[in-house]
Amino acid sequence: MEFKFKPIPASFKIDQKIKQSNYLINGNLVPWTGEFSSVYSTISSKENYEPTLLGHIPSLGKDQAIEALDSACKAFDKGKGIWPTMKVIDRIKAMENFVEDMKGKRDEIVKLLMWEIGKNHNDSKKEFDRTVDYIYDTIEAYKQIDRGSANFQKNSGINAHIRRGPLGVVLCLGPYNYPLNETFCLLIPALIMGNTVIFKPAKHGVLLISPLMEAFQKHFPPGVVNILFGRGRTLATPIMESGKINVLALIGHSSSANALQESHPKKNRLRLVLGLEAKNPAIILPDADLDLTIKECLNGALSFNGQRCTALKIIYVHEDIKNDFLSRFSDQVDKLKFGNPWESDVNLTPLPEPNKPNYINELINDAKSKGAKIMNQKGGETSENYVYPAVLYPVSKEMNVYKDEQFGPVVPIISFNDINEPLDDMAESNYGQQVSIFGKNTSTLAPLIDTLVNLVCRVNINSSCQRGPDIYPFTGRKDSAFSTLSVHDALRSFSIRTFVASKDNDENNKIIKNLLGSEDSNFISTDYIL
């Protein structure tokens, strides 16, 4: 695979290495004097290829992990802490101040998104802006929840004041493919609901947290946000083994989630908020509009090189249109432009994981050895940090690319005659996040939809799988998710309904009235947040 090096525009050059020399514990940016890990980009800054050193992060260990845990527990203070007992409006104000500071770091974070994970310039800007919008949407959703709680209810002679309260201490572990957006979809709702958090950034996309360290320190009380750097298992395992974590919030692989869950000694006390892997299929019916279908499948399978849990990871196409689809789709794949993230009109960019090209080639070679062919001319062409997308057909169940979530530029395709074939495969699959169906005949689509909604959690009609808009539910069945992540649902995932009750009599009613009038309680309040 030929890739002609082009001079890097000055605005995108890495002129200065980032040395993240501290970590955040108990409201202090603690200097680290131990070992550091080097952070490299697979993007070369030289004509002769070599990875680019971006900076260094602390290699923290068990002692620092327990220090962060103690800090978070102290800040929650068995529910007595400043943050969990704070007025809702004051937590909202803290979050608003944080996001204002965050917006001033846009250019720096966008640049790091490009270098650390290879996301193109437009998508990097979108990730930042979408994250800011998500925070504002979360604030507004929390206001709506609180407005609905600004009252007393009466039933069977009992007055009740019902609100949502925090769960306790949250361990937050985000993914590398959306190290800002997806991570903050865990972090922000957990925080605003009054929980305290231990947060470890993803392995790839770790340095982009550096510009935000002071903002986290400045706008949240000591111990509410604790940020660690280092290996996930080294830090997360002792934290979980303590039994003091109330919520495990993770976006990643089910194997990691299972291992961490197993290390917790009191699983009945542990709430899980998990976004996990998926094998989202596209099902292309004989009457599908092929122009639209190819466009959507192209974007769905290969946007950000297919490194999305919401990507189309297997395509089922009806025998009647198989040849036409394969030919036209393969041609379109070969037209996709590969280059560095800042280059114009780039669709495909370097893979952030150094070993990913080898893994992709292993999938391709395994499929070829079991009868699949590469249908596009450029498929499988390899450079130091990329494998050009391979369209594989015919794919069978014995192939690893059928069984595994490839999370990269490989598009496996299966043909079918009977619609029950893809439906049976989906029913037997370990995953159940989304599906895309392409067709026009409503009498065919209707029963198909009615079945698919019981196999996955989102059915996309004539469009690729996706997460947004963030107000819609984002979850999955089986090994694809646990709990629901979206603006409204995430606030509920990181909280619990709790209430104050009193018998409806003169003495109790007088006490309640006095509590409301004095405003001594942050919980008992009927203030309406505008």
Image (spheres, helix red, strand yellow):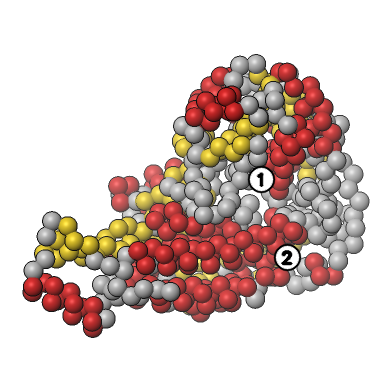
Residue 161 appearing in the image: yes
Q: Nearer the viewer, residue 43 or 444?
A: 444
Indicate the position of residue 319 as horizontal and vertical percent values. 71, 18
How busy is the neighbourhood of tag 1: few (under 14 within 10 Å), some, or many (20 plus)? Answer: many
Q: Quadrant of the N terminus?
A: top right
Q: Which residue is mark 2?
A: 111
Q: Please name the residue shown 84% across and 46% down the image.
A: 337
For the residues labelled 1 and 2, the Cα–Cα distance comes to 19 Å
Quadrant of the image occupied by residue 289: top right
Q: Secondary structure at mark 1?
A: loop
Inspect the image, locate mark 1, and give the three-letter code of the amino acid beneath it.
Gln
Residue ranking furthest to the top: 417
Inspect the image, locate mark 2, and give the three-letter code of the amino acid beneath it.
Lys
Please give left or right for residue 435 compared with residue 150 in the image: right
Kindly identify which numbered label has been placed on residue 307: 1
Q: Quadrant of the C terminus?
A: bottom left
Q: Please name the residue shown 40% across and 73% down the image.
A: 529
Q: Nearer the viewer, residue 257 or 275?
A: 275
Indicate the position of residue 469 as horizontal and vertical percent values. 57, 53
Q: Nearer the viewer, residue 369 or 197?
A: 197
Circle nearer the N terminus (1, 2): 2
Vertical position of residue 248 compared to residue 59: above or below: above
